[in-house]
Amino acid sequence: MDITNSLDISQEEIEPFLDETTALDQQRRSQLRIIFDRFVRNKVAIVGACFLIFMVVLCFLGPLVTGHNQPDVTHPLDSLKPPSAAYPLGTDLIGHDQFARVMYGGRLSLLVGLGSMLVAVFFGVTLGAFAGFYGGLIDNILMRVTDIALAVPAYLLLFLLSIAYSDGSPLSIILLISVLSWTYTARLVRGEFLALREREYVLAARTIGARGLRLMFRHILPNAAGPIIVNATLLIGANIIFESVLSYFGFGLQPPAASWGNMVADGKGLLDVAPWMVIAPGLLIFLTVLSSNLVGDGLRDALDPRMTER
Amino acid sequence: MGRYIIRRLLQTIPLLLLLSIFFFVLIHALPGGPERVLQNPHLGAAGQAALRARFGLDQPLPIQYVRWVGNMLVGDFGNSFADNQPVAAVLQQRFPNTVELFSVALLLALVLAVFLGLVSGVRQNSLTDYTLTVVSYFGIAMPAFLLGLFLQDLFGVQLHWLPTSGTETLGMNFDAFNSFYDHFLHLLLPMVTLSILFIAGWSRYMRSSTIDVVKQDYMRTAQAKGVSPTAMLLRHALRNAIIPLITIVALDFGQIAGGATITEGIFAWPGMGSLFLDSLDKRDYPVLLAILLISAVFVITFNIIADILYAVVDPRIRYS
């Protein structure tokens, strides 16, 4: 009796001060803010993010600032020149300014990586959401289509499709690569939707009258956003590799248009005479893909703190 | 379990049917068509029509498809357009090379991945752990064609240690041992190139399952009753941590028929992948179709094997 009394009193006394404690201060941060803070603390991921931003700035603004803006002009007298002040990354056999080509090629590589990710995520999320939410026929069709896509080694299909349907333009390559990469996203989203649609908050939303598209995209999708964002980030890197492999084997962007992949292919026979022809674009592919993976893993840790100890 | 396997096998029949239609339509959509190889400038229109008729290409697509599937069911994949050899014979030449390359590369990857993953899972933030992180990021971000190119240049062209392409030194008359040794040297570079990506993925997997396992109570029990650290690692941790990896390895092994295409292309390794690239150039429909279908059969089969293995190694999982 005595004890409960004193407890009641103490609670009343403490409560007015509760919101001034630091622990509760932290709860005032928005979910986004918490995730952002966690991401920023991950130094490796920040390095990756900075490098990606740097690459975008270099490729899209670099030609204007540095004056190396003529990737297609040949300088036959300056054939196979090593890196110098005039040509910071040297020249190739017919005297292309490799620095300019690396930047213009980077535009295409980044564009293809980003573009095909967006297309793949758009279709993957839409189809995965419908299949996971409604189930039934849509789900069955989607699962069979992804079964087909998973049953063929990706590169065989990629080479075949590029011969059949690609005209070597960036747009056709973007569509081609997204055809191959949307299936994983679709399965991922489907799984998330299957699990989330049974949750109480979805039921609650249903009881106050939300249904169909509103439930899917207003209530369920935001809660599935984490894995989708991580997947999207990793897709950028994977798709840049896809593009470079295509271009390397001559199925991708056609010369004279430069991409990092076909620059490596151009230089492979001259590796001993002009190693800079391979090293510069090769290193950029490597570092860009590496950065996108670092950012993706950083985002995963930030979005799902249980994963950090892994 | 038996019923489960039978059900899975039955499910593959419609899938294979769908796949065969998909492949057939896709291949026949290739621009250029087989005339690219068959065409002889001296051949008139009548001769060309006769050639098309000889390969049955003048028939409507559905009829060609039915004929193709019917022949395949009795083991006849048709003849290659390029050299008129039976496709089955061509594949028999190439497939063993791919199996060899893929198997040794995956074996190397498995050994290294298990070692790296186990050690870095037990000792997080140790030197091995950092090595693993670097290796796995390197493996994921390094395109195979680039790695292959650099390895070729370094060990083949600069150092003259290793051959850069093919499976054997031409024009040499080796005795049995030297010919084996020569073949082994040719295998080294493609093997390493192919294994990097698998090492990267598998070792991360092994690491996280090791971290889960070492936290378990039976590990503490083992330690309490005085089991030596090595025995704990090998007999208790390894055996349980490797379970999830086994299914992943089985899944990846299903990629065998087409999964080494890039590596084979770089090192001119005469396997299924380089055959595919050649045949694509020649629009050799029967060969392309056979490779696609065989690779799909392998992927599907190993998918089922992976699911079964999962239940075999982990008795808690039951299928009905």
Image: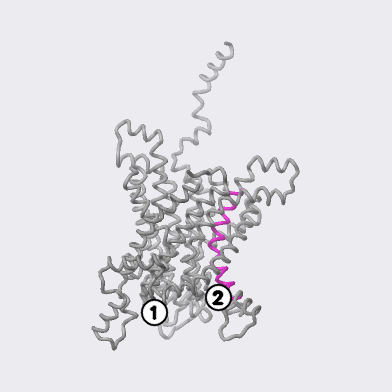
Residue at the image point whose x is 41% and y is 55% from the top: B12
Q: Is residue A115 visible?
A: no
Where residue B258 sits in the image (x, y, percent)?
A: 46, 66
Numbered label attached to residue B152? 2
Where residue A253 sits in the image (x, y, percent)?
A: 37, 71
Q: Nearer the viewer, residue B21 or B235?
A: B21
Q: Which residues are magenta?
A: B185-210
Kind of residue sitting beneath label 2? Gln
Numbered label attached to residue A286? none
- CA gap between label 1 and label 2 equals 34 Å
In this view, B172 is above or below A101: below
Mark 1 lies on a secondary structure that is loop
Where residue A203 sits in the image (x, y, percent)?
A: 36, 33
Parent chain of label 1 = B
Mark 2 lies on a secondary structure that is helix
Kind of residue sitting beneath label 1? Asn
Q: Is residue B282 magenta?
A: no
Q: Badge 1 is on which residue? A: B84
Q: Which coloring applies here? A: one colour
- Badge 1 density bin: few <14, some 14–19, many ≥20, Cα 10 Å: few
Residue at the image point whose x is 54% and y is 61% from the top: B198
Q: Specify the quadrant of the image occupied by residue A166.
A: bottom left
| Residue that sits furthest to the front in the current view | B74
In this view, B16 is above or below A244: above
